[in-house]
């Protein structure tokens, strides 16, 4: 917890500080590797994409908004986008899926799996408060819908993947998820 | 909004698309289309950032996994090829290391000469000239920046890419503080800006609403970044 803040390090990377880049890598690579492994399901591919991700981090650090903070969230967003681009570009992107996409055994209760606080929350109380609100609002969704949203997010499932899993037409699943996202937004904005 | 069959507000679809983009459920063509639009539409980009913050509650669901031990050296080799003139900064990093690096190298090569030079140096070092090449990752925009230290003028030439019809490219300077300062808009093919610069500072160009960023920092996507190095 007393490491130099990832927020500060990213600002240093923005002015092309290579020592800070190494430090950012040291603090974040295991997490991003975990993200990519979970989404891509293959260690070789995850390693390949992790390299791409840190090249983007070096080039885009200037886009990190220190006032907004949440450096780990910013890094995870880059990793998830890289993984999603890779997943959607796969020839079997429709229908045939990787082997680990059978019903997720370790996500029975999405709300229970949500953190009460994040170890990477950068100590920002305001962000904690916002997190707690999001968790509460997720708690208002039906469990199967919350589970679908969480599965899509964590594993990078497409609408087609979700339709296959839940055995419903793709338009139905899309309507489900859009409605869930709308309800989440309404809850957060009230 | 309580009746799902009622007509949603006009921006509702854009906001839900941003949510789906972050959730990751869109197919490749939809993802690409939305990303392209967000590149030139600050409001869309802001919606995406907002959903990223909301859905970040799931991030603790990702376990950590050890990356391969040789990955960082591979990344550094890709980012900082040995021919890179800035290589001398690899270990030290930070501001003004260009000056320091030069001084240390000189000392190592010819300590006596270094001392002699230091004794005879009449005053501050002569002004240097700096350059930076800015190449956008996602568009064909290419900018070539040259700073004449004697005149104190930065000349930025757009060597490729068109100026967007209803937006502006804005140039930013990032110094040791890490806080971007606007140097101005790049509307003409060649723009001259009076400014004091130093090696190791960084130039960045962002895409902004017409007239430039309404804030003190880039609000649109940062298209390219490059460090100023001595000519």
Image: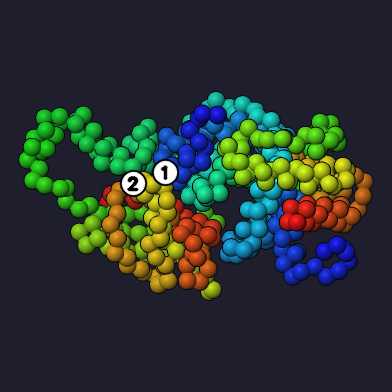
Task: Tell me which residue sits at (47%, 39%) in the image.
Answer: A9
Task: Tell me which residue sits at (8%, 46%) in the image.
Answer: B122
Q: Quadrant of the N terminus of chain B?
A: bottom right
Residue at mark 2: chain:
B
Task: Tell me which residue sits at (61%, 35%) in the image.
Answer: A120
Q: Is residue A116 left or right of residue A74?
A: right
Mark 1 and mark 2 in contact? Answer it, CB < 8 Å.
yes
* Residue B223: x %, y % from top left: 50, 57
Report the front residue among B62 and A97: B62
* Residue B13: x %, y % from top left: 75, 64
Above or below for B158 versus B223: below
Please, what secondary structure does the residue beneath circle 2 have? loop
* Camera sees residue A188: yes
* Residue B205: x %, y % from top left: 45, 59
* Residue A89: x %, y % from top left: 70, 49
Label 1, on which residue?
A16
Distance from Cα at disc 1 to Cα at disc 2: 8 Å
Label 2, on which residue?
B200
């Amino acid at each position: 917890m007393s490491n130099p803040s990832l927020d500060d390090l990213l600002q240093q990377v923005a002015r092309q500080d290579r020592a800070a880049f190494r430090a950012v890598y040291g603090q974040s690579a295991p997490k991003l590797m975990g993200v990519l492994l979970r989404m891509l399901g293959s260690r070789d591919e995850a390693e390949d994409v992790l390299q791409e991700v840190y090249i983007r981090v070096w080039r885009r650090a200037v886009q990190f908004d220190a006032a907004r903070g949440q450096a780990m969230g910013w890094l995870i967003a880059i990793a998830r986008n890289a993984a999603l681009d890779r997943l959607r570009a796969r020839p079997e992107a429709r229908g045939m899926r990787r082997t680990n996409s059978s019903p997720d055994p370790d996500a029975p209760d999405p709300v229970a799996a949500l953190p009460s606080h994040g170890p990477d929350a950068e100590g920002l109380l305001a962000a904690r408060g916002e997190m707690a609100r999001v968790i509460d609002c997720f708690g208002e969704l039906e469990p199967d819908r919350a589970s679908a949203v969480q599965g899509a997010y964590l594993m990078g499932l497409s609408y087609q993947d979700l339709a296959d899993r839940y055995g419903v037409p793709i338009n139905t699943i899309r309507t489900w998820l859009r409605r869930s996202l709308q309800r989440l937004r309404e809850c957060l904005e009230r | 909004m309580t009746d799902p069959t009622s007509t949603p507000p006009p921006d509702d679809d854009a906001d839900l698309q941003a949510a789906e983009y972050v959730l990751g459920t869109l197919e490749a063509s939809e993802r690409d289309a939305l990303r392209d639009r967000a590149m030139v539409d600050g409001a869309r980009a802001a919606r995406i950032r907002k959903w990223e913050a909301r859905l970040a509650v799931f991030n603790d669901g990702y376990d950590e996994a050890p990356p391969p031990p040789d990955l960082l050296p591979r990344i550094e080799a890709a980012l900082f090829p040995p021919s890179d003139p800035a290589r001398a900064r690899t270990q030290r990093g930070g501001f003004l290391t260009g000056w320091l690096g030069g001084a240390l190298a000189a000392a190592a090569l010819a300590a006596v000469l270094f001392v002699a030079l230091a004794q005879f140096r009449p005053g501050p070092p002569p002004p240097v000239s700096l350059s930076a090449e800015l190449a956008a990752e996602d568009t064909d925009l290419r900018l070539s920046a040259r700073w004449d230290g004697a005149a104190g003028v930065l000349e930025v030439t757009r060597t490729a890419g068109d100026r967007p019809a209803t937006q502006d490219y804005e140039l930013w300077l990032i110094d040791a503080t890490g806080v971007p300062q606007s140097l101005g808009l790049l509307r003409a093919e060649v723009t001259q800006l009076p400014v004091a610069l130093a090696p190791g500072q960084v130039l960045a160009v962002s895409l902004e609403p017409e007239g430039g960023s309404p804030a003190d920092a880039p609000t649109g996507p940062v298209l390219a970044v490059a460090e100023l190095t001595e000519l």
